[in-house]
Image (spheres, grey):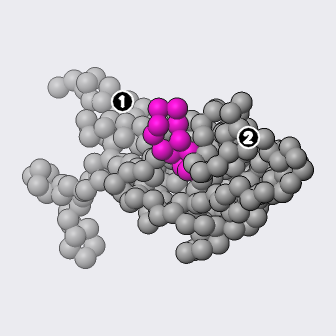
Amino acid sequence: MGRSFFNAYSGIAAYQRSLQQIADNLANVNTHGYKKSEVSFTELLYSDLQDKRYAVDPLPGGLAPIRGKGTHMYPVTRFFDQGPLQQTERSLDLAIEGDGFFRIIREDGTEAYTRRGAFYVDEGGNIVTDRGEHLDVDFDLDGIMINTVIVGPNGQVSGENEAGVMVELGEIELYTFVNRGGLSKDSAGLFEVTEASGEPEQGLPGTNGLGTLRQYHLEGSNVDLAMEMVHLIASQRALQGNTRSMITADELKALTLLVRG
C-alpha cells in the first residue's frame, strides 16, 4: 500500500514539473531568440513480486508478476530549432540564419551566449544588449551614424562616420558547440558553457557550418503554440490520473484500518 503512495507522488512531482516547463514555453512564445524546452520521463526499475514471497501466479509466458517503483525525470531537454525570422526597422537588429550564437560579455567579465540579436549603442559607442552586456567584438560605433551601419551576411560591419565617409569597422564572429544541448541557461536567458557542451568554436558567419547574419531581422521564439497546448492537456490528464491513484490508495488503506476481526 505504501508503494502506491510513493509511485503516485513521483508521478505528481514529474508532471507538475512538466506543467511548469510548458508554462515557461507559453510565456515566452513572443520572446525573440527563445528556445523551447521539454521535460521527459522514464519508469524506474521494476521489482519482482515473488521476491516478497507473495502468493502470485506467473504471467503468460512464465514471466513473474512485477510492480513499478515510480517515475524518473530526465534533465530538461532544450530544442535549438531555427525560429522564424521577423523583419524590423533597426539597423542593429541581427538574426542568425542557421547555427551559431553571439558571445556576450557581462559586467563582471564573464562570457555568455545568446541567439537574441537586438543590440543597442551605449554612451561609449559600445554595442550592447538591452541589459547593458557588451557584444564581444573588437570595434565600437563611436562617431558612426547608427542608421548607416551595414552588417553583411558574413559578419563584416561598416558605417558612415561624421564626415560622411563609409569606413570598415570590423567583424562579428559567431560561436558554436559540439553539444548545444549541454549549455546551461541563466535567469536572464543567456547560455553558459558546461563540460557537457564543450568549449566554443568561433568563426565568421557562413564558414565552418556557421549560419549567416540577417540585418534588420530578429529570430522569433521556436515555441509551437498548438503543440504546447497538446502537451499541456496531456500533462494535466496525467497529473489528474496520478492524483486519483493516490486518493484510491488512501481510500483502500482507510478501508483496511476499518476491518474488524
Q: Which residue is mark 1?
A: 250
At 64% from the left edge and 49% from the top edge, which residue is drawn?
139
In the image: residue 258, left or right of residue 237: left
Q: Quadrant of residue 249?
A: top left
Q: Which amino acid type is marked by label 2? A: Asp
Compare marks 1 and 2 and give the one earlier in the sequence: 2
> On screen, 36 above or below 23?
below
Viewer-side label of 1, 2: 2
At 52% from the left edge and 54% from the top edge, which residue is drawn?
78
At 25% from the left edge and 35% from the top edge, which residue is drawn?
2
Residue 132 in the image, given as x and y percentages of width and height: 63, 33
Q: Residue furthest front?
A: 163
Image quadrant for the N terminus?
top left
In the image: residue 222, left or right of residue 102: right
Residue 138 in the image, given as x and y percentages of width and height: 59, 51
Which region of the structure is painted magenta? Answer: 103-113
In the image: residue 63, left or right of residue 238: left
Q: Which residue is mark 2?
A: 142
Q: Which amino acid type is marked by label 1? A: Asp
Query: How many C-alpha atoms fall within 10 Å of the one at disc 2: few (<14), some, or many (≥20)?
Result: some
Is 259 magenta? The answer is: no
The residues bearing labels 1 and 2 have C-alpha atoms spaced at a distance of 70 Å
In the image: residue 54, left or right of residue 81: left
Is residue 33 in view? yes
> On screen, 158 above or below 204?
above
How many numbered marks are there? 2
